[in-house]
Amino acid sequence: MASPRDAMITGIGLVSCLGDGVDAHWASLMREGGCQPVVDHTSFAPWPVHPMTALELDRQIPRRGDQRQMEAWQRIGTYAAGLALDSAGMKGNADLLSRMDMIVAAGGGERDYAVDTAILSALPSAADPGAYLNEHLLSDLRPTLFLAQLSNLLAGNISIVHGVVGSSRTFMGEESAGTDAVRIACARIAAGQGDLFLVGGSYNAQRADVLLHYEMGRLLWKQPFAGVWHRQVQSGGMILGSVGCFLVIESREHAATRGAANLAHIAAIATDRSRRRPGEATAIATHQFDAMRQHLDPSHAAVISGASGAPAATMEEAEFLRDLRLPVRATASAFGHSLEPSFPANLAIAAISLANRRLFPPLEASELETPMAAELRQVLVTSWGHWRGEALAVVEAA
Amino acid sequence: MARSDVDSRGRPVVVVTGTGVLTSLGNGKQDNWRELTAGHSGIRRISRFPVAGLRTTIAGTIDFVPVDELSAPALSQRLAEFVIDEAVDEAAIGSSGDFPGPMFLALPPVEMEWPQRLALAAASGANETVTYDDLLRAAGTGRFARYHERFLFGSVAENLAVRFGTKGSPVATSTACASGATAIQLGVEAIRRGECEAALVIGTDASVNPESLIRFSLLSALSTRNDPPEAAARPFSKDRDGFVMAEGAGALVLESLAHARARGANIIGVIEGCGEMADGFHRTRSSPDGKPIIACMQHALDDAGLTPDAIGYINAHGTGTPENDKMEWVGASAVFGERAASIPISSNKSMIGHTLTAAGAVEAIFTLLSLRHGRLPPTINYDTPDPTLPVDCVPNVARDAQVAHAISNSFGFGGQNVCLVVGTP
């Protein structure tokens, strides 16, 4: 039953290796002969990475001065936020933007590699290592780099460039930052604590420092590209992807009042955590699913999985999904795993598919990724973080 | 007359039943309140790392809390553990390791730091020139797996959730120097939605390290008045020249009034209203017209169902930067009109420095204590009034005052503005 407080997706901004915008993504996912992910095997060899498609930044970030003040992750996010506002028909609408609430899922920006490596090379033999570090950081760090790295400055840049100023909150915590951002936006809409939200995040995977971070955890795939499920046959591992995704989420009544088109309905969402002892994530996901399954029509439903490729969690999620007996698509096989924006991006893929009333073909040969001929009416979106965090949402056709 | 369990809009009233605080003035409410009302400063010369060549050599570091393998997230987590223990103990809620509600944590952004980077470089065996390829090779040995976990943005909240048994997915937030207030607002909203009866809210920050200090220094945000350290933070003074970085943590147990009453809890104060408004003017500066700050305070008052004349005290953001204090006065004078100059407005940062991510939570707690004890902490180092800021900043000496409602301001880089209205039970 439709409620005026339903959380509707009314705008999508999505950029990844598959392209710039919703249409480019759908075309790529529906490509004859199967989706062809773009993989950069050379820049960071042996680690494959899904690079961001070329973006005409001027289209969404018109002032070059603003572009210069940002690192790549902020530019990707600010660009995607602009696309979402365009898609929702809100760009430049100061009245709406001044009361739009923003929740951004953010990590941080990249290091200055030249500064880092120069210091790492010379510091151990410096006469006074502490003084050497101080002197070189003080003279070599760009003053603006701090703001270009700072987590809450993606939101700050969106306020500056697009004028979203109703409120601005940044969540941190890898995949969970993205899932909780959406959950809290939906909960606030349901409770009347807001009508209009901009929610999402961005990730720049083309960075030695993020590869370093996940390599320390030995969580990366170091062989030629393979799909998420196929990787599990061997040691498993993540292939990171550069992604930006923002969603405009608003109450059904607010969308109706301003004549906005509903793209999809976030009918249910739950987030939780476990310590990931064997079976714990499954227990949480099962509990989440049981609370939602009564509304599910399996003959018209599919799963968009956020499986990262990280071994233990992906293996366990595969088992959980097998029992659901629904067609599954793991989008990390198409545009890589992107931590913070991964869940918003998968909601976007769900919404695009629902708007087209069909599921795109399998992304890899896997018993989980079965073809689906029936009309698509509901999508379960999973997010099992590579380390922590389990989330599940049901997205329905609007 | 006793408060109703719901406010004028029919929402659950959110009360505070436990607080914990740790700053450079000490560990725990008792020590902090004594030092704060005595007008003492916790700012000292930095001893944690060499300060040779730095323009700013002072900070409000926490040096009395030992931690294994020091890093900002490690010490931030440790500080959070102390203040949560104190808050949960005071609230006498749940049982040990089983807090009956969600967690909202204000946390500084996380990244690997120089000691770890140097450890990787050393392990790589690289000779004269170290590259990221060398670091990556060292990472692949698996000897640094603990760094993966330590420097995730999510691991402090996860570890605290495990230790204190909070429910659901813990939310870690960063709205720069407004983060602590944002965490409180998230908790208040969750209780008002009826999602939970109690929430654990924390702000913690222990990021005084060479690179963090230098980053703020490069933005010319820090005081360089190094000698004597305790005189550097001078909010509202004509000769203020920047803020002083500091560490600290604050935790609050929030509860619906109905729930607190039902279990006979001691109620410390009420979070009556929260307001926010982002500023799209500039990355580090406020709109010159002060509109976002004004709107933020007004939203908080509206949310509390109060008019400006109900406010008897302002706990200032009061960083002591030339820009902040000027804009805060612009905001206050617009919201409070002619009364602005006579409402006491003091800055805890004059004594504890700027606890950054933690400030919103730490200062909300000090505001609650001010109401509870009927005593307003001073703004110290107020020797040279700024004639353009005709504030009653409770200069240099604490003052007795019975106040029913106060506002606590938090403003941060990136156009972040959050104001909280707190009241007596």
Image (cartoon, rainbow, N blue to C red):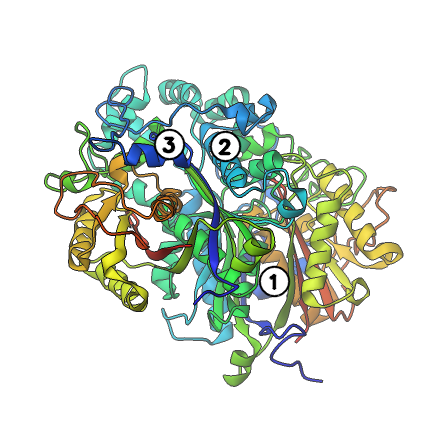
Q: Residue at x 50, y 72 (%)?
A: B194
Relative height, residue A382 to residue B45 (above, below) = below
Q: CA distance from mark 2 to mark 1?
A: 39 Å
Amino acid type, residue under disc 1 in the picture: Ile
Q: Quadrant of residue B181?
A: bottom right
Q: Residue at x 72, y 59 (%)?
A: B377
> Mark 3, mark 2: which one is toward the viewer?
3
Q: Residues within 10 Å of mark 2 (few under 14, many from 20)?
A: many
Q: Which numbered dot is residue A83?
A: none
- Where in the figure is residue B401, as x and y percent of width and height? 78, 68
Q: CA distance from mark 3 to mark 2?
A: 15 Å
- Where in the figure is residue B229, as x and y percent of width and height? 65, 41
Q: Is residue A336 left or right of residue B4?
A: left
In this view of the protein, can residue A164 be seen by the observer?
yes
Amino acid type, residue under disc 3 in the picture: Ala
Quadrant containing the N terminus of chain B in the rendered view: bottom right
Q: Which chain is home to disc 3?
A: A
Where does label 3 land, which residue?
A: A24
Where does label 2 land, which residue?
A: A79
Q: Which chain is home to disc 1?
A: B
Where does label 1 land, which residue?
A: B365
